[in-house]
């Protein structure tokens, strides 16, 4: 019984939140890794792209709710998501046309593109603030829980409860669908294949008649979809605040690099590695350990390795360790 | 137009902008902008050393600036003897244990081979971490329990605050050494992410380690190296002199105080600028640029690329640390919660790129000009919005929204300026020569 209690406490406080957060990071990191693989630069504006997509989705969500359209027990934001994605696609294609295209034609070095993306980051950050301000916004509606801690306790008779939020379940399901679609697209369709070819060897791909403009356009569209989805899922699970999204850049980049920049599979693995490390290292393990240890050995303190404010330090430490010992990441990524 | 005339004209433009601000908005705000502009110019000099000279992509400027601010507190505040007695030694013993653990782990990595290496490193790190926490936590709790409403930290050395400027530089240099040792071998994008992360970690440490500088409880009321306004107002001879100049003593004293800072900051800026110019035109500076332009060729010529990179990374970071200490001195308080990467890292980058990377005068110009713009965008934006919305009736939601969004003009403008400069004048206003 004690063992089961420990297991449930672990699932409730570490596994389920880690899984949801990992899925959000993974979709974010997929976007970063796609841009890196095909356009060959680290896009610092990605966090703000996520914020933009989420902001538009929130606007549509409020509009839907005000005219009485809801999604039953599910959050209305899921209905608004396609509109958010559409707006973000327009934004990214517009940015590419107005900004990045010039540097691509000039064959500017990647580091220049990174600085350019810093400028885009400023602009997008400003645009998001124009649209929706800097407030903390919660936009999840519908049922809050699939199962609450109390229901779980009554059902199983255990001391510990396992609460699963609707948003957590949705995150995992949506993430799974998104990843499946992406891999199907990259591996089975003609455009997807030409994108992979372009990523592996640009010159050879151009020689074999692949249209680079089309590849770049499709990449931005996919990135818009990924970024908006990641942003909306994160916002549903926690809350929306422009500044938090900017800060997500660090764990997202850590995930993409740990997995191997340019490698989609790596981005997913990296997302979960970063998320679970953050959660396990900043979680106070006392609640789990009291069930597992004999009473005489029970820990006095919280058994928290690091306080939650140091979660950046965790993603960063993993990043450094991986870079020092396996510079191309866990899965083989590209190198410039 | 010769380049010299052009450059002088650009600096003249900054002077005109500042004087115009003084005449329209008052000299107090003009001096306020000038002082922060001077500090920004020093930060830009530091970034220009790293990026302009050596091509190192450091976006952790915020961290070094914050470390400089920490130095201001640690140097100038009074020590708290009770806290030292309660747990000062224990904290330092804990930190020493932590440092020993890292050193031992690095040694193990270097000396041992194969599987023993991995196992030994892991044992040292895990064991060392728990040992460190066991010793350190007790000390931290004891110190933070001492009069938490007022102090709760160990306090400082009670030295003149101006000493904290070089100390801030040293602190930042020390951090830069550790970071450079681990991260400088990485490619540019990785170095960027690594420095971004380190800056966040430094801020997290400063927010959470209350024993150091009270964390988010902030330290206010730092000493001032120039006489502050209240002291001046109580000084009869100053009031008399102000009156003879036709100035109200309140305004006169604030102006005098700010002028004092402006003089001090200008001296520091000129010294650093002179040093940076000397460095740029020395064999060392030429070597740096050679390494930046072609690492492989420079290495083939027998240049030690790695240690040169480390050297200039430390120097640039130290300059940012000095500026950070100066800024905290000017503010009179350390508020770790206000350090944000957009303001303290990316804005400095805008200054360097707009001013002209690789040119010290460009960096200084960028610092002054962009800071002026950063401050003035809000009032200008508000003015623009009031003109645009003047046709709308008062209280209409569109008008309210337009007026409200003027507050967000800053980031948008900075981004546009950066993008436009990169596109149409990628070498900046005063390009490298």
Image (spheres, rainbow, N blue to C red):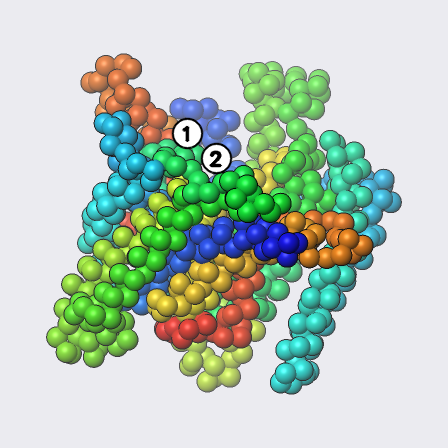
Q: Is residue B170 left or right of residue B8?
A: right
Q: Is residue A79 left or right of residue A312?
A: left
Is residue B52 in view?
A: no
Picture disc at residue B21: 1
Q: Residues within 10 Å of mark 2 (few under 14, many from 20)?
A: many
Picture disc at residue B33: 2
**Image quarter of residue A115:** bottom left
Work out whether residue B414 or residue B376 is closer to the camera in this orientation and state it.
B414
- Looking at the rendered structure, the secondary structure element under dot 2 is helix
Look at the image and tell me in which quarter the C terminus of chain A lies: bottom left
Q: Could you tell me which chain the residue with mark 2 belongs to?
A: B
Determine the residue located farthest toward the top in the rendered image. Answer: B394
Picture disc at residue A306: none
Look at the image and tell me in which quarter the N terminus of chain A lies: bottom right
Identify the residue at image location x=52%, y=55%.
A15
Is residue B152 in view?
A: yes
Work out whether residue B318 or residue B392 is closer to the camera in this orientation and state it.
B392
Q: Could you tell me which chain the residue with mark 1 belongs to?
A: B
Q: Residues within 10 Å of mark 1 (few under 14, many from 20)?
A: some
The number of numbered badges drawn on the structure is 2
- Counting from the top left corner in percent of width and height, residue B166 is at 66, 52
- Counting from the top left corner in percent of width and height, residue B281 is at 48, 66
- Tag 1 and tag 2, C-beta contact below 8 Å: yes
Counting residues from the start of the chain, the first of labels 1 and 2 encountered is: 1
Identify the residue at image location x=27%, y=14%.
B394
Work out whether residue B240 or residue A303 is closer to the camera in this orientation and state it.
A303
């Amino acid at each position: 019984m004690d063992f089961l209690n420990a297991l449930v406490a672990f699932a409730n406080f570490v596994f389920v939140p880690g899984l949801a957060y990992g899925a959000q990071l993974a979709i974010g990191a997929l976007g970063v890794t796609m841009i890196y693989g095909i356009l060959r630069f680290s896009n610092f504006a990605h966090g703000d792209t996520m914020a933009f997509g989420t902001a538009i989705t929130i606007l549509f969500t409020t509009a839907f709710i005000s005219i009485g359209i809801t999604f039953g027990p599910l959050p209305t934001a899921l209905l608004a998501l396609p509109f958010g994605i559409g707006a973000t696609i327009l934004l990214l294609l517009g940015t590419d046309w107005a900004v990045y295209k010039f540097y691509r034609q000039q064959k500017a070095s990647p580091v220049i593109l990174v600085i350019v993306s810093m400028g885009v980051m400023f602009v997008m950050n400003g645009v998001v603030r124009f649209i929706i301000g800097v407030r903390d916004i919660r936009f999840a509606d519908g049922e809050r829980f699939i199962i609450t801690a109390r229901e779980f306790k009554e059902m199983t008779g255990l001391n510990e409860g396992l609460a699963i939020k609707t948003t957590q379940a949705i995150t995992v399901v949506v993430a799974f669908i998104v990843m499946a679609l992406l891999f199907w697209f990259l591996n089975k369709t003609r455009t997807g294949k030409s994108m992979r070819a372009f990523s592996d060897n640009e010159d050879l791909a151009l020689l074999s008649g692949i249209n680079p403009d089309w590849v770049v356009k499709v990449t931005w569209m996919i990135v818009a979809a990924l970024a908006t989805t990641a942003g909306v899922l994160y916002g549903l699970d926690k809350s929306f605040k422009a500044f938090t999204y900017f800060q997500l850049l660090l764990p997202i980049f850590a995930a993409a690099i740990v997995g191997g920049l340019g490698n989609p599979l790596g981005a997913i693995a990296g997302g979960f590695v970063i998320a679970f490390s953050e959660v396990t290292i900043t979680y106070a393990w006392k609640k789990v350990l009291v069930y597992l240890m004999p009473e005489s050995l029970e820990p006095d303190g919280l058994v928290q390795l690091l306080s939650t404010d140091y979660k950046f330090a965790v993603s960063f430490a993993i990043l450094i360790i991986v870079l020092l010992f396996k510079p191309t990441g866990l899965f083989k990524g590209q190198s410039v | 137009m010769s380049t010299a005339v052009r450059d002088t004209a650009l600096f003249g433009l900054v002077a005109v902008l500042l004087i115009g601000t003084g005449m329209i908005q008052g000299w107090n705000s003009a001096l306020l902008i000038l002082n922060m502009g001077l500090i920004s110019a020093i930060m830009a000099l530091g970034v220009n050393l790293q990026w302009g000279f050596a091509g190192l992509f450091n976006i952790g400027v915020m961290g070094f600036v914050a470390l400089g601010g920490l130095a201001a507190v640690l140097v100038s505040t009074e020590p708290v003897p009770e806290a030292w007695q309660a747990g000062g030694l224990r904290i330092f013993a804990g930190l020493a244990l932590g440092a020993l653990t890292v050193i031992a782990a690095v040694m193990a990595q270097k000396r041992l081979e194969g599987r023993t290496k991995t196992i030994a490193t892991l044992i040292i790190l895990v064991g060392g971490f728990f040992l460190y926490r066991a010793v350190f936590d007790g000390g931290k709790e004891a110190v933070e329990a001492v009069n938490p409403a007022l102090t709760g930290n160990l306090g400082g050395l009670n030295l003149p605050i101006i000493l904290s400027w070089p100390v801030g530089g040293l602190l930042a240099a020390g951090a830069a050494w550790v970071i450079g040792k681990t991260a400088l071998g990485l490619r540019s994008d990785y170095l960027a992410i690594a420095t971004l992360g380190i800056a966040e970690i430094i801020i997290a440490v400063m927010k959470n380690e209350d024993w150091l500088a009270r964390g988010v409880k902030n330290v206010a009321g730092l000493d001032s190296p120039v006489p502050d306004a209240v002291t001046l107002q109580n000084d009869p001879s100053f009031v008399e002199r102000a009156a003879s100049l036709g100035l109200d003593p309140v305004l006169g004293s604030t102006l005098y105080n700010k002028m004092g800072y402006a003089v001090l900051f200008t001296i520091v800026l000129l010294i650093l600028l002179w040093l940076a110019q000397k460095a740029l035109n020395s064999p060392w500076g030429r070597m740096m640029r050679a390494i930046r332009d072609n690492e492989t060729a420079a290495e083939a010529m027998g240049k030690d690329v790695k240690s040169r990179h480390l050297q200039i990374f430390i120097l640039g970071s130290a300059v940012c640390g000095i500026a950070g200490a100066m800024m905290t001195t000017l503010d009179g308080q350390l508020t770790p919660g206000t350090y944000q990467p957009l303001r303290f890292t990316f804005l400095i980058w805008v200054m360097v790129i707009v001013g002209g990377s690789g040119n010290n005068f460009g960096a200084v110009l960028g610092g002054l000009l962009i800071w002026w713009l950063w401050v003035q965008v809000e009032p200008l934006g508000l003015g623009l919005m009031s003109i645009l919305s003047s046709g709308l009736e008062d209280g209409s939601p569109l008008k309210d929204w337009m007026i409200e969004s003027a507050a967000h003009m800053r980031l948008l403008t900075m981004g546009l300026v950066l993008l436009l400069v990169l596109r149409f004048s990628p070498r900046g206003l005063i390009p490298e020569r």
